[in-house]
Image (cartoon, rainbow, N blue to C red):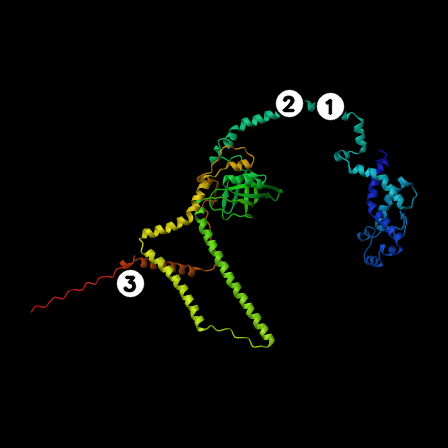
Amino acid sequence: PERILPLGEATAAASAALAAVRVKIDDYFTRCALAAFDPRAAVPLNRAEGDYGALAALDLDRRRAELASFTVARIEASRPLPLLEGLNPYWAGAMEAFARQVVAPLLGAGRTELSESEWLEVQARLQPYEAWMAARAGGAVAALGIARVREILAGDGLSRVGALLDRDASFATEVGELADLERLILYHANLNRLLNNFVSFSDFYDSGHDEIFRVGRLYIDGRLCDLCVEVKDVNSHATLAAAGKIFMAYCEINRPATKEKRFIGVAVTAGFASSLWVGRNGIFYDREGRDWEAVIIKIVESPVSLKEAFWSPWIKISAMVGDQIRKLLTAKQDAMLSATAKQIDTTTATVATGARPAAAPRMEGAALASSVAAIGIAVGLLGSAVGGLISVISGLPPWKTLAGVLAIFLAVSGPSVILAYFKLRARDLAPILNACGWAVNSRIRVTMRLGRTFTHEAALPPDAHLELGDAFAENRRGAVWSLIVAGLALVLFVYWRLGWLNAWLPSSWERRSRAGDPPATVVMPRETPEKP
């Protein structure tokens, strides 16, 4: 104790007084050592006159913050530290407390200065106390004070506490049995619900019950997703859940007010999933009705519905055609800009040299004729293709035409629909629950009808309606009517080509027979001979 508390009860105050000036005293002795090393350093190590001039216009007092950065005393080579006089006014009070509480008790009273060796000795005397304080444990007990702690240690409190602990330890077996009894009571009270959720799954197939593994519902993209499970590790869960062939959207949910953050996996089992992507935001409500901010961070893709599978090839085809047109137009634009820039550079260089710009080459007659012929051939091929298609259609009965259109749709969308159908029939919730830590052995099929109960569009409240009018939308009435007229004209033209309008048209407007049809036979009336 004497080594740790060299000043007894006053050691704590002495340590605090030393800590208040430690940095400034170390700085002072280091500067004095530099001045002893090179006398030229003494002047710059003391503050310049300009620094004092900056203080002249201020209202100064001893606690002015600008004074704190000045040295604690004047710097001279190997000069001891004054303790009472010649000190920086800002540090004078702290130095007086240091001399009274540290230097006088440890080195003797009456000292007016402190050498560097004495400074190191003072720090060494208090270092064991500082190390003990740094490693001290039991901050709650320290608030009692050393006197109260010694009083407690001198009494019989330690033995009484030990007796109470031994008594508690003697009931360890009973406490363990109470825990088992509590578990048994909970199983007895909730065994039916446990069996309905993880053995027979009757609650899962009954829309009137909420399963234990469902943690809430997610509102996102104008739809409501009821089948949400809690996830600890998104990547490992996604790897295991992929065997279930269910479209999974993993979301990070958080509540800014309480700084809570969790992860959930959401099964999308109906509708369209093309509008869900990483970064899409939504709102999640847990079983207690609390709202969470949700954002999609990972997606495991799988077929969602037959309707989406039917239109998916057409969407891909339209996207591919759009990309090709965009690339073609971009290439043409880049070529035009490159040619224009090259022509501008050539013209600029020619003007700079003073020469007359060369005239653009004229297209000769043969070249012009070949270009016109190429354009005519392209237009003719396009017209022939369109005419051939219309000719084939006009030669077919209406039911064959409809059958051909249907065959085209089946050829494009049929494989996608068939593949999606088998995947939708194979959807299984068991891998998702196993990835969450539930030991589920049997398959939990998610039929298409059941999937529509887990994912559906949020309905409007009763007697509510949407007003989709836009007061700032452009007036497209003329364009709409133009499209309607063009569509009607196209339908009438096809009907006329098929000959379906001949019954209502004049003979001069009727659809004439095709070139391959046999020529019509004209019957002329025979002349009657005149009687003599």
Q: What element carries label 3?
A: helix
Q: Which amino acid, mark 3?
A: Trp
Answer with left or right where residue 394 lies relative to residue 469. left
- Reply above or below: 473 against 106: below
- Reply above or below: 427 against 530: above
Q: Where residue 509 is drawn, which disc sits there?
A: 3
Who comes first in sequence, dot 3 or dot 2? 2
Q: How far apart are marks 3 and 2 (CA)?
A: 106 Å
Q: Which residue is drawn at 59% across and 24% down?
A: 181
Q: Distance between the residues labelled 2 and 1?
A: 18 Å
Residue to which mark 2 is pinned = 174
- Please state, as top left, top right, bottom left or bottom right, where the C terminus lies in the image: bottom left
Who comes first in sequence, dot 2 or dot 1? 1
Residue contact between numbered discs 2 and 1, judged by CB atoms under 8 Å: no
Give the class, few, some or many, for how many residues have Cα within 10 Å of label 2's Cα (few <14, many ≥20).
few
Q: In which quarter of the image is residue 128?
A: top right
Q: Which amino acid, mark 1?
A: Ala
Which of the two discs, 3 and 1, sits closer to the camera?
3
Q: What percent of the width, then of the height, locates residue 26?
A: 84, 47
Q: Which amino acid, mark 2?
A: Glu
Residue to which mark 1 is pinned = 163
